[in-house]
Amino acid sequence: MLSEIARQARLDALWKHMFGPDHKPVKTFKPRIRHRNMRGRFPTEKCRSTGMIRTRLPLMLDGLVHVDTNPDVVAIAAYPITFDYLSANSDGEVVGRSHTPDIGVLTRRGKVIFIDYVPYRVQQDTPWIKQRTAELRLHLEQFGAAYAIHDERSIYIQPRFNNLNLMKAHKPLPYQLAAIAETCRAIMRQPLPSTIGELCRMSGSSRSVTTLSTSTAA
């Protein structure tokens, strides 16, 4: 019983660090170097360490929209950890392998899920990915975590994907002035089309709008 308690304590400490402000991705990409895939940057408050995730391909960039707008996901870690696990090679021998998932996510219930973004065609052309997926799931089960692969079939479902992008576009940023959000809410409450003067008079937010305009002009 004591060993199980100690084991769980170590896991809790690992997850706390992984999703905390001091975590550093175990995989990095050098700037100004040409890559086969188009790299990208995804800003999110849920990545508590950097506020930004460097994506390794467009599919990952689009896939992050799902986890960033999911209210059940409270934290995201980019390239969080490298796992060492046992695998069977083509000769049936058991060998050691390692793998670094694209992201780890923490849910409100404390569940940890590791995700890789792999295009569907790559999965079809690479048979061993299916075996690796099964082996990683089995390996992570003993730590109370889960593993999944996301591809175009789940990411680009419409109209959900367009709706999530709209939610992402309207998501408040940490450095956004409070007056911006107040002005947006005031506009949404009024009939359109309207002039700025009409919106100010109808919403009673003329002071906020004027202050915002003055601050922006300065």
Image (cartoon, grey):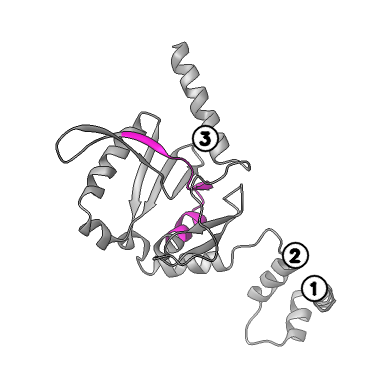
Q: Secondary structure at mark 3?
A: helix
Q: Earlier in the sequence, mark 3 or mark 1?
A: 3
Circle 3: is it few (<14), some (14-19), or many (20+) Cα within 10 Å?
some
**Residue 138 located left or right of residue 167:** left
Percent x, y for residue 211?
A: 84, 73
Measured along the vertical axis of the image, is residue 46 above or below residue 213?
A: above
Q: Secondary structure at mark 1?
A: helix
Q: Which residue is mark 1?
A: 212
Which residue type does callout 2 highlight?
Leu
Which residue is the extreme one toward the left? 91
Q: Earlier in the sequence, mark 2 or mark 1?
A: 2
Circle 2: is it few (<14), some (14-19), or many (20+) Cα within 10 Å?
few
Q: CA distance from mark 3 to mark 1?
A: 41 Å
Q: CA distance from mark 2 to mark 1?
A: 8 Å
Which residue is the extreme one toward the top? 2
Residue shown at 49% from the left, 28% from the top: 11
**Residue 155 located left or right of residue 171:** left
Measured along the vertical axis of the image, is residue 198 above or below residue 29?
A: below
Measured along the vertical axis of the image, is residue 96 above or below residue 212?
A: above
Q: CA distance from mark 3 to mark 2?
A: 33 Å
Residue shown at 67% from the left, 69% from the top: 185
Which residue type does callout 3 highlight?
Trp
Residues rendered magenta in the picture: 63-85
Please report contact status of discs 2 and 1: CB closer than 8 Å, yes or no. yes
Q: Which residue is mark 2?
A: 177
Q: Which residue is mark 3?
A: 15
